[in-house]
Each structure stands twice: as C-alpha cells, then as structure tokens.
Image: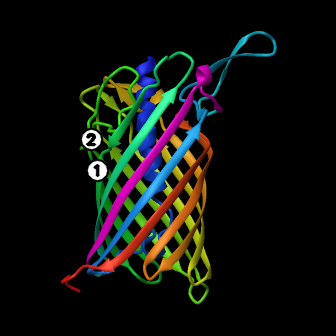
C-alpha cells in the first residue's frame, strides 16, 4: 500500500494488483494448494474479479480531536471512509494456466487485465486506467506425498505492463520485479470427502527505479479447508493474509508504504462436466493497513485436459 496526491493514487493501483492476485487463490478441484497438475495435463482458468468500495484501512496514524478538545492520533490500519467522499472501483480478468511437465512438477503462467478508477470530490475527471498488467510465472515441485503433500513453489512477477508515472493516474503495472518462495502443505481426509491446505510464502519486492520506490517485502499466509457434500460440489473456507514490511522512498524508510490485509473467504465450486469447474466466492476483509476494505466478488471457470502428443 503519502505525502502527495499522486503517491496515494499510485499506491492504490498497486493494491489492485495484489488484491486481484489474491483472488486467484480460490480452490480449484484437484489443483488447489500443494496438489500439482498431473504430468502431460494442461489446467487453464479464466477468472473475473470485481470490487466497489468507499472505505479503506489507513496507511498512517490519523490526527483526531479528542473529547477534551486536544489533538490525538488514530493508529494506522483503522477502517474508515476515503477522504472527500472517495470511491474506488476495480474490475479484473485473469488468464491462468499450469502444465504438468512430470509427476509432481508443473509450471504456470498468469496474465492479468485491469480496469480501475478512483473518484472523489476534489476531481472533475476520475483518474482511471485499463490494460494488461504484469505477467507472473511459476514452477512447483512436490517434495513429499506421505504423510502429507509438501510442495515447494517458486515464482516471479515480470514488469511487462506499461508503468506510467503521471499525477493522479492508477497504473496497471508496478514497474518492478518480484520473486516468490512458497511452501505448500496439503492433506486429504479420504474416505471423508474433505481436504486441508496451508501455504506460507515470502515475496521479495525490488525497487521501481523510475520513481525510487521499494514497496517492501511481504509474508503471505493461506489456511484452507474444503468439503464435498456431493461428488460435483465443493465448499471451502479460507483465511488469507498478506503482511508487508515498511517500504522505502528514495532510499529512506517509509512506514506509510506498509501493506497488510486479512481476508475470510468462503467459496463454492461446481463441476459442470468432466474436468470443467465453475467457481464463485467472496473475500471479506477483516483487517489491514494501506488497503481497500470491503468485499470482493470472484467468478472463475477452469478446465483440465491432456495435450495431444504430450509425454506421460
């Protein structure tokens, strides 16, 4: 997740990327968490994401007038309306694919598209931007299959999208490389049709050299439970957390760049036919700092199939 209007708008643009990327973590049949894509199979998904909110979790301590008419402060991270009747809107579409290159090993690609805007009473024209965002690549290696599944994931965000450094603009790209290392642990409770999964990841975020801003490294935690009451139906509940360190501007530590968010995320997945799955879910914010608050709606459609001529 400022001393100038531009910095606030720019930071909100970065928030959109993070929030929408988190939306992809809804359970998807057998490919959730530590479960890798079968060798020779291609898993593909398109996801739609939508959020409209007039609240956020503050980025720094806020001055307030106390009951005795003296000045005090409200700690950073309090949920409150945007200033000047601000309202934030975001729509995103994610194209994602994973391919199993061998038993227990797969590679992935993620291509996001954003349409986002922010408006308040101080502006005649709302700052808005749309377009493809930064591409992510990943690789996973399943280390153990008993007594639990244990998978190691590595990934990178490549600054492929245009980063425009303009006052008031919400850029669709962030302008810097990120690197992820994630440990994923999963367990099936068969013959009970249920599973559990825990992801613990660390993201190294490098500096955007064009504006001398380092957003700060992040810890990511996801705990998920899923239950299948019917063969074609999967219900899941997830607790998601992103906990960033303080960032830097022009080499100086800046606490207001610290980003944190925690979500409670119920979802439902229904198998339409064969390996084609339709998903829907809500992500409800329960706490954070320097992030939009409120609910996010996600809808996804995924399918899995063997590639013609693929080696098994």
- The verdict on residue 211 being magenta is no
Q: At 39% from the left edge and 73% from the top edge, which residue is drawn?
A: 303
In magenta, the rendered stretch is 79-102
**Residue 135 shows which numbered tag?**
1
Estimate the x, y position of residue 293 in percent, counting from the top left.
59, 40
- The residue that appears at 43% across and 45% down in the rendered structure is 18
- Please, what secondary structure does the residue beneath circle 1 have? strand
Question: In the rendered image, which quarter contains the C terminus?
Answer: bottom left
- Which quadrant of the view contains residue 211? top left
| Residue 19 locus on image (x, y percent) | 47, 46
Outermost residue, right direction?
68
Residue pictured at 33% horizontal, 22% vertical: 166
Q: Can residue 100 be found in the magenta stretch? A: yes
- Residue 11 x, y percent position in the rendering: 43, 31
Residue 193 location, quadrant: bottom right
Mark 2: which secondary structure? Answer: loop
Residue occupied by mark 2: 161
């Amino acid at each position: 997740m400022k001393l100038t209007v531009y910095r606030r708008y720019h930071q909100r643009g970065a928030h959109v990327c993070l929030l929408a990327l988190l939306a992809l973590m809804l359970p998807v049949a057998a490919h959730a968490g530590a479960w890798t894509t079968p060798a020779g199979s291609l898993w593909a998904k398109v996801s739609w994401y939508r959020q409209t909110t007039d609240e956020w979790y503050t980025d720094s301590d806020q001055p307030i007038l106390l009951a005795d008419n003296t000045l005090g402060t409200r700690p950073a991270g309090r949920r409150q309306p945007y200033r000047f009747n601000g309202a934030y809107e975001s729509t995103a579409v994610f194209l994602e694919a994973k391919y199993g290159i061998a038993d227990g090993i797969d590679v992935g690609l993620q291509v996001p598209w954003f349409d986002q805007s922010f408006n308040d009473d101080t502006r005649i024209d709302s700052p808005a931007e749309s377009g493809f965002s930064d591409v992510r690549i990943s690789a996973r290696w399943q280390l153990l299959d008993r007594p639990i599944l244990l998978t190691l994931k590595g990934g990178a965000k490549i600054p492929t999208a245009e980063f425009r450094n303009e006052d008031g603009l919400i850029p669709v790209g962030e302008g810097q490389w990120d690197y992820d290392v994630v440990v994923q642990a999963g367990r099936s409770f068969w013959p009970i049709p249920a599973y559990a999964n825990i992801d613990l990841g660390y993201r190294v975020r490098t500096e955007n050299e064009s504006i001398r801003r380092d957003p700060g490294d992040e810890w990511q935690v996801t705990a998920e439970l899923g239950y299948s009451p019917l063969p074609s139906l999967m219900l899941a509940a997830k607790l998601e957390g992103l906990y960033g360190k303080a960032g830097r501007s022009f080499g100086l530590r800046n606490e207001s760049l610290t980003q944190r968010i925690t979500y409670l995320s119920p979802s439902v997945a229904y198998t339409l036919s064969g390996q084609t799955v339709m998903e829907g879910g809500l992500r409800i914010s329960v706490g954070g700092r320097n992030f939009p608050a409120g609910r996010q709606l996600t809808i996804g459609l995924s399918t899995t199939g063997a590639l013609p001529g693929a080696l098994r």
